[in-house]
Image (cartoon, rainbow, N blue to C red):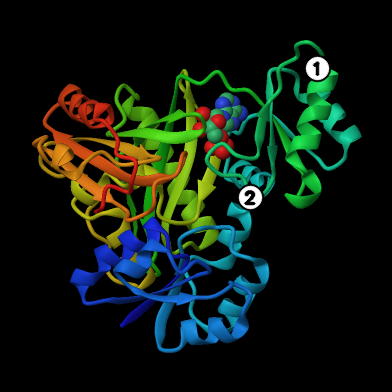
Amino acid sequence: MIVGVLGGGQLARMLALAGTPLGLRFRCLDPSPDAVAGHVAELVVADYRDEAALARFVAGVQVVTFEFENVPARAAQWLAEHATVAPVPRALEIGQDRVFEKRLFASVGMATAEHRAADTRAELHAAVAAVGAPCIVKTRRLGYDGKGQVRLVPVPSLSAAIDAAFDSLRPAESGGLVVEQMVAFDREVSVLAARNGRGEVMVYPLVENEHEGGILARSRAPAPEVPEKLVREAGEFVSVLLRELDYVGLLAVEMFVKGDRWIANELAPRVHNSGHWTIEGAECSQFENHLRAILDLPLGSTAMTAGGHATMVNLIGSLPARADVLAIPGVHLHAYGKAARPGRKVGHATALAADRATADALCARVAALPRSSGSGLA
Ligand code: AMP
């Protein structure tokens, strides 16, 4: 049985690594011949809009899934007409646009940061006036890892800052802008949940996320110090979202916790970086549960494995020496096989421990290791 994955990066690679023991084979489509899923799966190298290549990609494939949400609309439409795809194209459409996401959240009763959409310079000035400073201007589409957003600083002039944001974010190329009120959150978390075609839902323990420079730096599960009532509510919200979308697969929803309230930020209709700890830290990983869901298999347990505390640290830019990481007991290394480059996610490490402080300390040791200038894979 072959699973097709649009995209051949580390998420596709980890899907293939999770599905291989289940007897599945993988075919990935990516425009880059260096796509790292190609080390462990068949790789079709082509542009996503090349219909002849899409036809080769889907031939003999059981189901097509995605490692990213910004699938060109024409490719998504072609695939939906020629293959079984999961999750549903509607979830991709919503996940591509921050305003659609917020509308969906609101439709199921989830709070969002106060916001206004803006397409023109005049609309941006009006939106900032309506939302009030401090605020963040984001592109509606194509933003990732903190790219495509500007925090408005009213010094020396708010009006000049708005104009500069408009010029740098190029709204005509990114589907317009949205202005969001700055939320003084206590913590950032994500809810990961899987749903299969029979409507079974499994929710992972809540994850706390820390970003540095807009990029996820660390995730901790279960999220410390979030009251049980809030954890339950978050899981319930996401279960409602899954049903509302008739969603099949793994969904990640990023939220802010502020006092005793949830504020939903964005969703990812795919496996997510904040779920990488589940490979060793949960009974069934997000990758395996995504595959189980899209192949209509029974879902696996999302409970923590023995130890009960997981911390994941992203390795960004370059990797430490493999031997240095493996010398730390209780730490699991994932090197993605990507060339080193500033700001690029090239691997991650997960530490499991019986208590939170130990798991965090193990990951801090990994983060402090000297980095090599290469990919660390030689
Ligand atoms: P996003 O691309 O929406 O995930 O934003 C990247 C990061 O910017 C988030 O993980 C937050 O740390 C921060 N951020 C985004 N939106 C807001 C907001 N409305 N208020 C405060 N911080 C935000």
**Callout 1 environment at 10 Å: few (<14), some (14 to 19), or many (20+)?**
some
Looking at the rendered structure, the kind of residue marked 1 is Leu
SS of the residue at dot 2?
loop
**How far apart are the alpha carbons under marks 2 and 1?**
25 Å
Q: Quadrant of ligand 1?
A: top right
From this view, report whether residue 271 is shown above or below residue 314.
Answer: below
User: Residue 195's x, y, as percent?
Assistant: 39, 60
- Front residue of this view, candidates 282 and 360: 360
Front residue of 378 and 365: 378
Residue topped by disc 2: 142
> Which residue corresponds to mark 1?
158
Residue 105 versus residue 230 in the image, above or below? below
Residue 312, image x, y percentages? 28, 37
Q: Earlier in the sequence, mark 2 or mark 1?
A: 2
- Mark 2: few/some/many CA within 10 Å (<14, 14-19, 20+): some
| Element marked by disc 1 | helix
Q: Is residue 29 left or right of residue 114?
A: left
- The percent coordinates of residue 183 (x first, y second) are 58, 22
In the displayed structure, does residue 147 sit left or right of residue 222? right
Q: Is residue 255 left or right of residue 97?
A: left
Q: Residue at x 55, y 83 (%)?
A: 53
Amino acid beneath label 2: Leu
Q: Residue at x 86, y 28 (%)?
A: 126
Figure quadrant of the C terminus: bottom left
On the question of residue 264 being in view, the answer is no
